[in-house]
C-alpha cells in the first residue's frame, strides 16, 4: 500500500531532508493565551514555526499579552497578535475569529485558514454543593463549555479540508476524580471531553480533535487553591510517578511545599509539550482521545 502524501507545510533542510520547523506557515489560535499553560503552548508552537493569535479576556492582561506577542515575533520570526475577546460572552469567539481573519488573510486573494485551535481559556471556582448558585454555574459553563462551541462554529469556514487541522481542548483530571467543591468545574471539563469525542466525528475530514487532562500545574489558578484543597489532592500526588519532588532539580518552593501537597505540580511547559505533539503531523492517527498529561496523577484507560 502506498503511503499518502501529507499536505501540511514544513520547512526542510535540502541537504539533510530534516524538518526544521514542522509548523512553518501555519496559523494557531490559543485562547487564554496570555499566561500559564496558554502562554507556554504559544511559545512552543511559535518555536515550531506557527504564527499565533493569542486570545485574552481582561484589561489587566492586555499589556502582558502584547509583550508575549512581540516576544514570539522577535524570538521565532513568526507573526503574532493579541486579541481581547471574552469567551464567556456570546460575541467574544466570533470577534476573535474576525480579528484574526482581518490580520492574517492574504491581502490579494483573501485566503484565510486556521490550522490549529487550542481551547485553553477556562475559569474555576471551588465551592461546596450548598453554595452553588445559578450565577456561578452560568459563568463557568459559559466560558468552559459554550465558549469552545461558539469558537468552533465561528472557525468552521476556515478549517482545512484535508484532515490536517488540529484542535486540542484543555480539560482537567477534575472531569473524572470528583474533588470536593467541584460540582460545577468538574462538570464543565467532563462536558468538554464529551464534545471532544463528538467533534472528532463531525470534523473528521477537517481536523483531528483531542483533549489533554492536566492535574495540578504551577499556574495562577493552582496558586490560588487553599491548603485544604491541596491536602485533598495529596494522596493522588503521592502516587503519581512523575510528581515526586527532586531536590536540586525542582523549584525550591515546590520542594518546601511537597509535605503539604504530596508532590510537585507540573511546569507549564510540560503540558505544552504534550499539546504540541498533538498538533504535529505525527499525531494524524489520533483523534477523539483524552491524553493524560498529568505525570500519572490519573492513568488513561
Image (tube, rainbow, N blue to C red):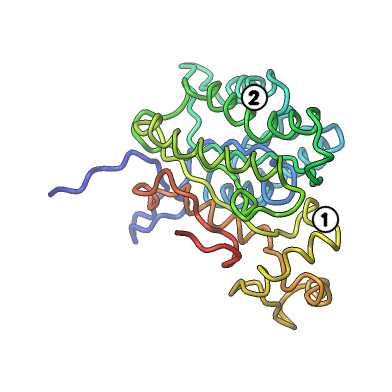
Above or below for 278 versus 195 = below
- What's the CA distance linking mark 2 and mark 1? 28 Å
Quarter of the picture holding the C terminus: bottom left
Helix, strand or loop at mark 2: helix
Judging depth in this view, the residue of 90 and 158 nearest the camera is 90
Tell me the tag on residue 110: none
Helix, strand or loop at mark 1: loop
On the image, the x and y values in percent for residue 203 come to 40, 31
Q: Verify CB contact (< 8 Å) between mark 2 and mark 1.
A: no
Q: Residue at x 64, y 39 (%)?
A: 188
Crowd tier of the residue under label 2, counting other residues whose Cα lies within 10 Å: few below 14, some 14–19, many 20 or above: many
Tell me the tag on residue 225: 1
Q: Residue at x 59, y 66 (%)?
A: 295
For discs 2 and 1, the disc positioned in front in the rendered view: 1
**Of marks 2 and 1, which one's residue comes earlier in the chain?**
2
Q: Residue at x 45, y 33 (%)?
A: 199
Quick check: 298 left or right of 264? left
Quick check: 61 left or right of 183? right
On the image, the x and y values in percent for residue 61 come to 82, 38
Crowd tier of the residue under label 1, counting other residues whose Cα lies within 10 Å: few below 14, some 14–19, many 20 or above: few
Quick check: 64 left or right of 142? right
* Residue of label 2: 93
Above or below for 261 versus 208 = below
On the image, the x and y values in percent for residue 10 come to 41, 46
In the image, farthest residue toward the front: 130
Judging depth in this view, the residue of 68 and 179 nearest the camera is 179
On the image, the x and y values in percent for residue 222 come to 77, 56
Amino acid at each position: 500500500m502506498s503511503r499518502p502524501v501529507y499536505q501540511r507545510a514544513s520547512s526542510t533542510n535540502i541537504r539533510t531532508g530534516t524538518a526544521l520547523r514542522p509548523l512553518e506557515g501555519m496559523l494557531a489560535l490559543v485562547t487564554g493565551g496570555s499566561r500559564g499553560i496558554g502562554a507556554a503552548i504559544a511559545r512552543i508552537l511559535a518555536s515550531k514555526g506557527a504564527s499565533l493569535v493569542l486570545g485574552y479576556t481582561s484589561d489587566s492582561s492586555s499589556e502582558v499579552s502584547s509583550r508575549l506577542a512581540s516576544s514570539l515575533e522577535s524570538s521565532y520570526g513568526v507573526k503574532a497578535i493579541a486579541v481581547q475577546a471574552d469567551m464567556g460572552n456570546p460575541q467574544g469567539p466570533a470577534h476573535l475569529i474576525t480579528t484574526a481573519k482581518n490580520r492574517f488573510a492574504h491581502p490579494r486573494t483573501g485566503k484565510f485558514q486556521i490550522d490549529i485551535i487550542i481551547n485553553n481559556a477556562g475559569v474555576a471556582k471551588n465551592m461546596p454543593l450548598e453554595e452553588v448558585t445559578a450565577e456561578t454555574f452560568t459563568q463557568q459553563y459559559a466560558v468552559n463549555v459554550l465558549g469552545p462551541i461558539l469558537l468552533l462554529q465561528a472557525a468552521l469556514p476556515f478549517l482545512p479540508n484535508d484532515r490536517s487541522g488540529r484542535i486540542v481542548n484543555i480539560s482537567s483530571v477534575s472531569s473524572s476524580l470528583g474533588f470536593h467543591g467541584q460540582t460545577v468545574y468538574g462538570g464543565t471539563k467532563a462536558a468538554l471531553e464529551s464534545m471532544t469525542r463528538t467533534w472528532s466525528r463531525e470534523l473528521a475530514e477537517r481536523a483531528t480533535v483531542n483533549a489533554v487532562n492536566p492535574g495540578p500545574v504551577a499556574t495562577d489558578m493552582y496558586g490560588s487553591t487553599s491548603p485544604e484543597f491541596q491536602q485533598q489532592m495529596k494522596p493522588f500526588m503521592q502516587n503519581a510517578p512523575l510528581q515526586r519532588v527532586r531536590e536540586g532539580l525542582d523549584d525550591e518552593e515546590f520542594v518546601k511545599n511537597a509535605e503539604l501537597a504530596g508532590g510537585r505540580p507540573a511546569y507549564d511547559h510540560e503540558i505544552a509539550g504534550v499539546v504540541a505533539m498533538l498538533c504535529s503531523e505525527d499525531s494524524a492517527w489520533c483523534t477523539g482521545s483524552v491524553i493524560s498529561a498529568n505525570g500519572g496523577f490519573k492513568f488513561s484507560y
